[in-house]
């Protein structure tokens, strides 16, 4: 029988509108009061910015979605989504100011969507940015009823003269100082899920540990002029992401002797995947790495400890 209306065709406008009203009603300083219009934004404070430039970033959370579905736990995926976007912006030297989300699903399930949004709002609070809008798309002929996907978008304005990396200043002997990761973060799950598919829920809960948001911890280092370059360690691993910020001829000489979260020990102990492949896929315990002059090491460590962070001295720059 052919459908007589949109709802019978699989798209429930009323449910979508109700979810939009739910978002608009969330009481948080990170949620714009203007949600629900055709566009959203914020007022910009350009104090101290002489040559403004806007940077933007977009990302998703990959197949970590399937870990959440197995555990029926969705409230941290939004944190991952925000983290993947805002950390990329931070290592470019800009604070994220606006965040937008896109949720696509086969069927609107209010409980799941509300949990996803809870995490997105928490992530925006942690990153100090504003959720200014988004889109929820119900597409029954593209996704199965229980399927969904997430995408995030963030923007921020900074001074062009303060952008990172400052690759021309990087010298042999510069240090690689890292903020530890909270776990696997949001990359490598197509491999991790298969390696750990027979593990119990305790291990899968470790996989679901949200990606750490580094904005508030990292930006003070940049604002004090301590950072020559920084890399968010995502797909491609530590070496792959460092090469994106280093000048030609500069090579990261990594110690690989730092203590990583337990989940990496479990993956290593399976002895299914060679160590070089693990290092290419996973962050291996390092979430964000800064290139810092040796003369600034003590100040960097002191600043980190003021924030309750113990930096990892992961290696140094050598010439190839």
Image: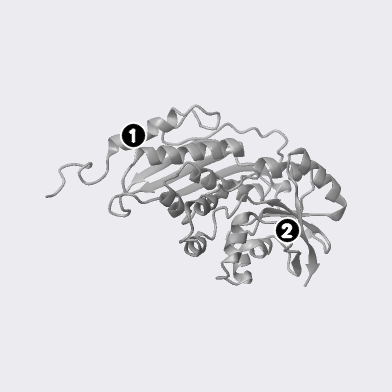
Labels 1 and 2: the sequence-earlier one: 1
Q: Residue at x 78, y 41 (%)?
A: 305
Q: Residue at x 76, y 43 (%)?
A: 304
Q: Residue furthest right?
A: 295
Q: Which of the two discs, 1 and 2, sits closer to the camera?
A: 2
Horizontal and vertical percent position of residue 52: 66, 42
Q: Where residue 258 is drawn, which disc sits there? A: 2
Q: Where residue 54 is drawn, which disc sits there? A: none
Q: Nearer the viewer, residue 36 or 26?
A: 26
Horizontal and vertical percent position of residue 145: 30, 49
Q: Would residue 176 be found to the left or right of residue 279 on screen?
A: right
Helix, strand or loop under label 2? loop
Q: Nearer the viewer, residue 8 or 118?
A: 118
Q: Where residue 17 is drawn, which disc sits there? A: 1
Q: Would residue 184 be found to the left or right of residue 105 on screen?
A: right
Mark yes or no: residue 310 visible: yes
236 above or below 149? Answer: below
Q: Tell me which corner region of the image, top left, top right, bottom left or bottom right, holds residue 154.
A: top right
Q: Residue at x 46, y 56 (%)?
A: 63
11 above or below 256? Answer: above
Q: Would residue 71 be found to the left or right of residue 92 on screen?
A: left
């Amino acid at each position: 029988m052919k459908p007589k209306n949109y709802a019978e065709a699989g798209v429930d406008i009323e449910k979508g509108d109700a979810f939009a009203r739910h978002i608009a009603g969330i009481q948080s300083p990170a949620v714009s009061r203007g949600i629900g219009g055709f566009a959203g934004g914020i007022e910009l404070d350009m104090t101290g910015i002489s040559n403004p430039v806007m940077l933007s970033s977009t990302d998703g959370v990959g197949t970590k979605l399937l870990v959440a579905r197995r555990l029926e736990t969705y409230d941290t995926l939004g944190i991952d989504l925000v983290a993947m976007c805002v950390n990329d912006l931070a290592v470019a030297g800009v604070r994220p100011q606006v965040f937008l989300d896109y949720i696509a699903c086969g069927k609107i399930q209010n409980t799941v969507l509300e949990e996803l949004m809870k995490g997105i709002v928490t992530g925006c609070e942690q990153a100090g940015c504003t959720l200014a809008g988004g889109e929820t798309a119900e597409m029954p002929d593209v996704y199965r009823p229980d399927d969904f996907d997430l995408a995030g978008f963030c923007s921020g304005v900074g001074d062009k003269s303060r952008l990172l990396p400052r690759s021309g200043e990087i010298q042999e002997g510069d240090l690689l100082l890292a903020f530890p990761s909270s776990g696997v973060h949001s990359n490598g799950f197509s491999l991790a899920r298969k390696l750990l598919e027979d593990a119990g829920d305790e291990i899968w809960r470790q996989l679901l540990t949200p990606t750490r948001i580094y904005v508030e911890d990292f930006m003070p280092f940049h604002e004090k002029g301590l950072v020559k370059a920084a890399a968010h360690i995502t797909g491609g691993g530590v070496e792959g992401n460092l090469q994106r910020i280093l000048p030609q001829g500069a090579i990261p000489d990594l110690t690989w002797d730092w203590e990583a979260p337990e989940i990496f020990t479990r993956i290593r102990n399976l002895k299914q995947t060679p160590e070089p492949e693990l290092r290419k896929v996973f962050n291996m315990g390092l979430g964000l790495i800064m290139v810092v002059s040796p003369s600034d090491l003590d100040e960097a460590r002191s600043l980190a400890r003021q924030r309750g962070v113990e930096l990892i001295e992961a290696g140094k720059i050598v010439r190839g």
